[in-house]
Amino acid sequence: MLIALLALFSLLIAYVLHHVLSHQTLLLQRIFAQTIYNTLQLARLIGPLDPYDPLAVPDPIPDSNSASKISEAEALAAQRIDYARSIVDFSYAGPKVELEDRLRLRALANSRLVAAFGINTSLTSSSVSVHKKFRKLASASINKSRADWQKLYGVCMDFLQCEKARYGRTGIGLAECVRCLCFVVVLVSQFGADDKKVDKNLVKRITDEINAQWLKSKEDGGAVKTSDSLNHDLGMLFGTLKTSVAEENGTGKDTSIDPSEALGLIMPQYETLWRVVLLTYVTAYYTQFDKRSLKKRVKDIPYCLGNADLPMFQEGLRLYPSNNSIYRAATGPGPLKSADVQACHRDFNVWGRDALEFRPERFDNLTPLQEKAYFPFSLGSHKCPAFGGFGNRMVTMLVVSMGRALSPEAGKLNFKDAQLDNHVGINLPTGRDEMENWSWDMVRLQ
């Protein structure tokens, strides 16, 4: 009888301990999850308060009975995406916004670019005639055949081999290298320039000054002024290059343009390229991607660029959109409207827990919400002319040429930052001034 009572008492104690410990474990899990959530929410307060703030953060980790919570999280993500899209496609300004009004709202938001660079394009002007002329020239410049991709790939490889010969032993500054590479490729593809005759030192000065002017305009758009040294160097460059763009209709006639128009055409393409190319190259070849899968995906480049699907570089544009945010002017008094493209591209509730990872295979089967959340080339009638394949192919060609010429087998990536150097898979900073110290150092053979 005593043994039976002791056994019953032991079972009771075991049940109570199990219940208490299980409760404590669940409580600790929830406290931990809520602490992470509260920390991310606190980070949001560093920036401007906005009830429609599209910054995506994961919701608190749900328990096993949370299907409704997950649906609610996706619904909130969809609202943030709809808000961002309404800014990009101008629907925030009304159900039907005329072209001139759309141009005005965009030009007001981009006025700093006029002050910094003196350019008059579709991005900075409210003139319909300027807009149409710019779109015509821009569309003509990207109407390329398959043979052009092979030629441009050769230009890239020649440029990078020269960089290795000049700087490889002492370390190639990646930001400077990629800026110059993208600028030269734009000169060749848009203006038919002979890359062998392009003064690389002049290109370096021009790209350095464009970068400096861009940073100044971000810091204080009202105080920045056009750069005399940039205008002088551009005059020297285009004084020796063909400054015309082939007509889109294929008549063989060219439209002559002056250096200021040339800069207006170069800026949208060059500026939207170099950061995407640098960050995708570093991620794909050094920090996050399966190297065997990488080689398989790019083995037919550049010959396949005329008709290939390129999910690898769609993923690059997802993580590193050329414009992290797109701005429009308010329809009345008030600050600029901002669509956070990067937040939509990285929302955990849209892309999953691996939203910050480089996984090209996700583009093999996007969900409807993911398709809606992905808009690296803007939306509607104001989509970038590179939409439709050209942008992906250009990024692909540049990244693959970088990966082959400055490969992990031949050199080492040096961030000169302990946190980045020691953590594979870490998220890269995307600010243009945060990449200046990165270098590729050639491996010395013993």
Image: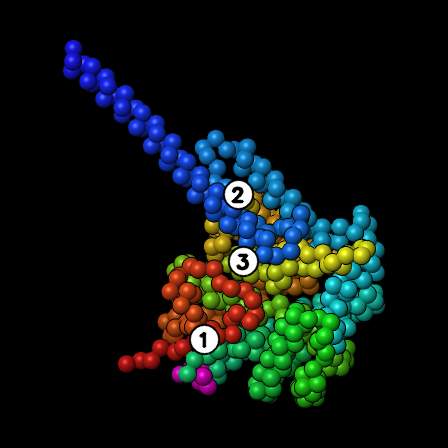
Measured in 3D between alpha carbons, the distance from the residue under mark 1 to the one under mark 2, in whole angstroms, is 37 Å
Say which of 397 and 10 sits in front.
10
Q: Position of residue 60 (x, y in %)?
A: 50, 41
Q: How is the image coloured?
A: rainbow
Closer to viewer: mark 2 or mark 3: 2
As shown in the figure, which amino acid type bears the numbered disc 1? Ser
Q: Which residues are magenta?
A: 164-169
Q: Is residue 167 magenta?
A: yes
Numbered label attached to residue 59: 2
Q: Which residue is mark 3?
A: 319
Residue 292: percent from left, percent from top: 39, 60
Residue at the spot x=59%, y=53% of the render? 45
Magenta span: predominant SS is helix
Residue 279 badge: none
The residue to which callout 1 is attached is 439
Q: Secondary structure at mark 2?
A: loop
The span from disc 2 to disc 3 (Cα, nearest Å) is 20 Å
Task: Give the structural element (helix, strand or loop) at label 3.
Answer: helix
Looking at marks 3 and 1 on the same chain, the residue that comes earlier in the sequence is marked by: 3
Q: Nearer the viewer, residue 237 or 16?
A: 16
Separation of residues labelled 3 and 1 (CA atoms): 21 Å
Residue visible at 37% across and 36% down in the picture: 25
Name the foreground residue: 410 vs 330.
Answer: 330
Pointer 2 with pointer 3, Cβ within 8 A? no
**Left or right of residue 21, residue 263 in this image:** right
Using the rendered image of the protein, determine whether residue 181 is visible from the camera's viewpoint.
no
> Could you tell me the amino acid type at mark 3?
Leu
Residue type, mark 2 in image = Asp
Q: Is residue 279 visible?
A: yes
Depth-wise, is mark 1 or mark 2 nearer the camera? 2
